[in-house]
Image (cartoon, rainbow, N blue to C red):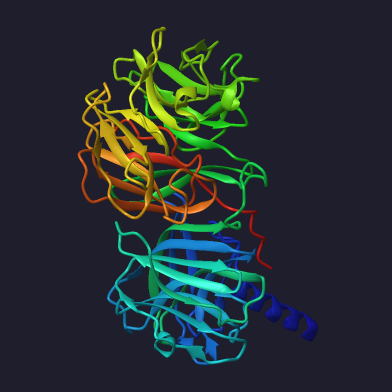
Amino acid sequence: MKWLLLYSTSFLFSLSFAQGPVGIFSGHADIGSPAIKGDAQYHPLDQSYHLQAGGYNIWFGRDEFHYAFNTIKGDFILTANFKLLGKGVDTHRKTGWMVRASKDDDAAHMTATVHGDGMVALQWRRMKGAHMRDPQDELFTKKQGTEIIQLERQGKVFIMRVAHPGEPLQEIGRTDAVDMPDEVLAGIFLSSHNPDVKEEAMAWNVRIEQTVPDDYNGYAHGVLPSRLEVMNVFDGKRRIVHEDKGRFEAPNWMKDGKRLLFNQGGAIYTLPVEGGQPEKLNTGSANRNNNDHVISFDGKWLAISSHREGMPGGGSTIYVLPITGGEPLLVTDSTPSYLHGWSPDGKEVVYTAQRRSFGPTYNIFKKPVKGGKETQLTFLNSGLADGPEYSPDGKWIYYNATESGSMQVWRMRPDGSGKEQLTFDEYNNWFPHISPDNKWIVFLSFPNTVSPNDHPFYKRVMLRLMPVAGGAPRAIAYLYGGQGTINTPSWSPDSKHIAFVSNTGPAVKQAN
């Protein structure tokens, strides 16, 4: 009987300490045995998290808080929006991201913290049992009232970045001062900073992305798993609707608003917007399709880029076929040609291509779908012009080009005249896509550490939004991706949502 009582007590303790999976996290638990027990709840409809917790603090030589976490190994990026709920009792209640050596209450950890008074700071315990370090000790900047928090691990170095909605992420702290093993716990947390009080917080757009070295080549070294996401561009809320261990790319939103189209393994697939089982589309003899595929404005036709054996530059060739599938019709005989847009009347396609007269440089061309002469629209002798797309009213072709040095967004008239540069910043901006209501452009921004002529896989990138006539771009999503994220038009028919692909490394391990 005494043995049974001890066993029952131990079993109850383990239940209170390590609770089951919640959302993307394989476990959640109270750390440090706080007097008031915490909880973590996941809301599948919007993929958000609701945290409740007590706890005296996360400070000095030990911690008390509630933690939703995964076990993860290697380098990674953690990104989410955080909000403390209610007025709160103590101004130093805190939430955010935490990377922890173990579930011990005195474990070494690195924390990207949002406080109740709005202070945001990088804080850490260097080794097990040590006292916490205040950012003032290292003269790190503290930034007030930011909602978006990112914590990145690069080997022994941890980097904290923050942003208000609409801003690019800004680095506010970096250190290699923590004795952290290669395999760690990583997740979201909440502490009330008062042992007699329960506080609440929420987190959304929660992403854990395992990363690869900067010189990693997605073609030569292998692929990372892919996630198809949809996002409301006006409130910034994202949902993952499909995941795969392989590479898929470049979603298009179909005209009925109910399905998405993407490429994978040389084939084209469709998928319900809410998720489900992908269905392969019949593209006939074109079975080496890349990530340049576009649906006509009337929704009846699909243009694709598919590779032909033995042709120059890899043989990317443009074809058209019914949106329901069928044998494709050849449009461009010269290669390489990479499709990016239809004219609104469905009579022409616009694309980037490499032609011998301009050597290795890619320029923009257009050509009638039913046959006719190819017309060149840009005339760069070096650099690159790419991503051409007609505006819905047919008055402009938007594209990206290195004409001014870095990769920026431009537009021109359909005959190639009236070229205007629309973005002027330190980023390399790719693939402008125009909303169906002709009011907005969404585009992909690479950091300036990436060559202007390159749009590689597996980089820390942003999606940004701006008016069609130009103006200050607004950051709407922070992700790990690049090539294949948003190469082709991906707006929903109601001009409220976009679809895109993000990437992450191997699946995380289950919590013990």
Q: Nearer the viewer, residue 494 or 415?
A: 415
Along the horizontal axis of the image, is 36 left or right of 306? left
Q: Residue furthest top?
A: 371
Q: In the image, is residue 441 above or below residue 146? A: above
Residue 432 visible in this rendered orientation of the protein: no
Q: Nearer the viewer, residue 478 or 94?
A: 478
In the rendering, at what x and y percent does residue 240 appear? 48, 46
Q: In the image, is residue 319 above or below residue 294? A: above
Counting labels gives: 0
Q: Quadrant of residue 153?
A: bottom right
In the rendering, at what x and y percent does residue 289 appear? 56, 25
Which quadrant, please, contains the N terminus? bottom right
Question: Which residue corresponds to the image point at 36% horizontal and 79% vertical from the top-left?
Answer: 141
Q: Nearer the viewer, residue 299 or 65?
A: 299
Q: Nearer the viewer, residue 411 or 105?
A: 411
Residue 61 visible in this rendered orientation of the protein: yes
Question: Which residue corresponds to the image point at 55% horizontal and 77% vertical from the top-left?
Answer: 30
Question: Which residue corresponds to the image point at 27% horizontal and 34% vertical from the top-left?
Answer: 411
In the rendering, at what x and y percent does residue 136 appear? 39, 88
In the rendering, at what x and y percent does residue 204 appear? 41, 58
Which quadrant, please, contains the C terminus? bottom right
